[in-house]
Image (cartoon, coloured by chain):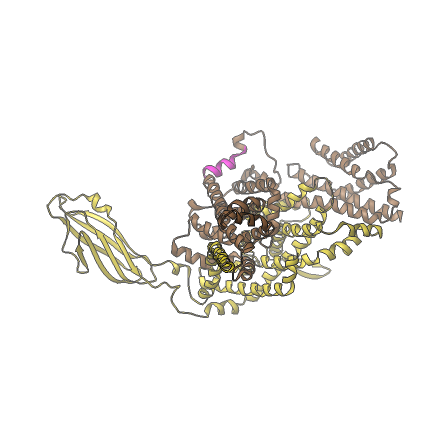
Amino acid sequence: MKFKSLIITLFVSSIFLSTIICIWKIMATLQGLSFTNLNFNLNMLLALGLTIICILIGKKINHIFKILILSLLFTIIYKLLNESSPLWFTTGIFFLFLFFTNKLKKFDLKYLSQDFISEKIIFDFLSLFAIVFFALVILFPFYIMFVTSFKTQTALLINPLDLSIDFSKNIFEIFKSYFVIFKTYDFGRYILTSSYVSIGTVLITLLFAIPAAYAVARLNFFGKTFLSTSILIIYMFPAIVLVIPLYTVFSQLGLRNSIEGLLIVYTATTLPVAIYMLQGYFKSIPKEIEEAGLIDGQNWFGIIIKIIIPLSLPAIASVSLYVFMIAWNEFLFSLMFLDNPKTFTLSRAINHLTGDAETPRQYLMAGSVVVTLPILLIFVYFEKYLVSGLTAGSVKG
Amino acid sequence: MSTTLSKIEKKTAYTLLLPAVFLVFAIVLFPIFANIWISFKEVELKDIRIPEPRAKKIVKTISENNFELKIIYKLRNSSLIQDISKVKFSDKLPKNVKPVNLDKRCEFKSQKIKCLFGTWKAGYRENFEIFVKDINNNNINKKNLKSYKPDLSGESDNILLTTNFTLKNFKKVFFNNNFFELLMTTFYFTFFGTLGAILLGIFAAQLVNQKFYGRSFMRSILLFPYVGPVVALAYTWTLLLDPNSGTLNSLLVNFNIIDKPINLLGQKYLIINILGFELKLRLALTTVIFFEIWRYFPLAFLFILARLQAIPKDLYEAADVDGAGPFRKFFSITLPQITAILSILFMIRFIWNFNKFEDIFLLTGGASGTLTLPISVYQQGFAISNIGMGSAVSIVIVLLLITFMLIYFKLIGKKANEI
């Protein structure tokens, strides 16, 4: 039993260590270091050695002392066995060893003889793997997007792996892509259009959805169940099946290339989910509060304005943020309805940039950063509200 | 008393609902039905522009003084395909100015020239001339004369409103050789995209449901791919996977993992040799599916995490007492607790992935074997400009969607309300 768990620990932990060393190496390669070999096997042996020593020492000496000494020792061995590398890279390796030995804190021969310990160890390391995996897989494209916007086309063609930002240049040179897209490609206007469209969609949607949701949640009328089920069904129909008829009708009415046309379409497509989310929340408000309002002589309008809205601000915030996100990110309708650069939204503008194969990629990425950053900041800041909106609306996507 | 109250209630309800319902009907429900109408017609993109009678006004001097002037109206039918009938024309003249030898089709009344031109054939053009004269032999102000804009109107058949129907579009859709492939591609994309997103979602939810340092940070990050705009993310991926100087290919070549770059988004098949068997992998489609999974697993993750957090803790404590390991706990407690939500999630995500347009459109544009039904709508309707065909494909999508929804409501509709 003890032997089996020992083997598993050694195996799993050293795979983990050599994997993160590989990832560190890849990230360093992207900063312009010219590694051509990942040395996975060598690192694996090194990691095996480290784990064995760690487990054998166990808790016999002070923990901090132990991890410092071991990390330093193995960093030196690593440095001797591998190709030469700058100091910052080696420091990174040292911290990786430090992190790893710290993770092995509990591990000694006694710990390894517990019940189910091998399963637990595998599970622990799987979690660690998962954290590294998800962080890497998700953040890597964002990282590429961000750093590419600071490079130049020629530098990228010469060495596509060197994504380091040259800080020796002046500010204007570093942020050149951003100056260019705002000056030559008129991105300032597109930001305004996008904000106008998104905020407008939020306001109109709320204006229409709050009364409707209130009616669905509280009032009795003929066809109520039919309406509330059809809300969800309508929501399931995708934009792509609406696009041809809307295109023809909008062309004939002259609504193409107009912000108003976009506002109408965005509002209509987000209304069902807004009503659905709001009515759920309205139902949770105790009826007695409204009845008190009725006795005070309020009409329905007064009740909605003075009682329902103040009580359901969190839900309204969720809906607003969700609708804002959908409108800001929307692409299909803006592609179909806008072909005059004067009315472009940000998404449409970026798509327009790619239409010209000559457009250097750093401009494209700078544009992408400009459209992505606001929505990510809003998301991080209002995460609580947006997450509840997303969960409710996650039937769509 | 109570009947009047309920009447008032009904009336209020309808007033409150009317704007929202009207808007949704006009923009969502109407197009779905309009698709049926259009799909039975032979309409092209150029047909939907309504033909207009147009006139361009030019004022010319004909003698040394400006007592008399010539006005030329360049008349034309804006459409090259359709006729306009009952074309009416009117224009105003300044005070004291009168037309001389007016055309038979026109009459002059209270300073206005009114003409009836009858029918203009498709592509019709005419230079229509009028001579005008000041009655007091004063100079005519040219600018003033020019400032009046002629007013034209006419009637034309709107091709969309005629009642000529044809089955051509549907014949083309169904009996096209590629229809089966189109359907299969759509199903591959939908099925594997959904499955992958849910599997990854389970992993992520299981991970975030544990306690570890930086857990809330992890939770925010996991939602980034979904929150970010699809345009930006798709182009970033295109750059990342680019065969010439994309980061991924350069890395793989640099570390000698592959010999030469692979065009992940532009190559239809990848032939793999396993034990002498040749396997053909749909490469571009697989890449697109991976993007799809990457972008939409956050939704599955959110849903599953919410459910995981609702599982009573004592179930796990009991398992601890029984001496169950973490894997046993996952398969015997967690998985049975989330199967209901997984089935709902699968159906909903299936329907939505089935409709996905932007992701594939931005990554490959439907090339290299990634043509799905929604992309086909766009290609038929806008790339080939055959609106009728596009609508016919839309109808196919709607019919399949309705089938999926019926299955969904039959299987798990009732359960969905409980969760």
Q: Please tell me whether the stretch drawn in magenta is mainly helix, strand or loop.
A: helix
Q: Position of residue A47 (x, y in %)?
A: 80, 40
Q: Is residue B184 left or right of residue A211?
A: right
Q: Quick one: A191 or B261, which is closer to the camera?
A: A191
Which chain is rendered yellow in the image?
B
Q: Quadrant of the C terminus of chain B?
A: bottom right
**Residue at image x 66%, y 50%?**
B301
Q: Residue A178 in magenta? A: yes
Can residue B416 be seen by looking at this rendering?
Answer: yes
**Residue at the left extreme?**
B136
Q: Position of residue A212 (x, y in %)?
A: 51, 53
Image colour for chain A is: brown
Q: Residue A229 in magenta? A: no
Q: Quick one: B319 or A356, which is closer to the camera?
A: B319
**Residue at the front extreme?**
B1
Q: Which residues are magenta?
A: A174-184
Q: Quick one: B247 or A192, which is closer to the camera?
A: A192
Q: Position of residue B35 (x, y in %)?
A: 47, 63
Q: Is residue A35 left or right of residue B226?
A: right
Can residue B389 be seen by looking at this rendering?
Answer: no
Figure label count: 0
Q: Position of residue A95 (x, y in %)?
A: 74, 34
**Residue at image x 54%, y 47%?**
A293
Q: Is residue A1 left or right of residue A214?
A: right
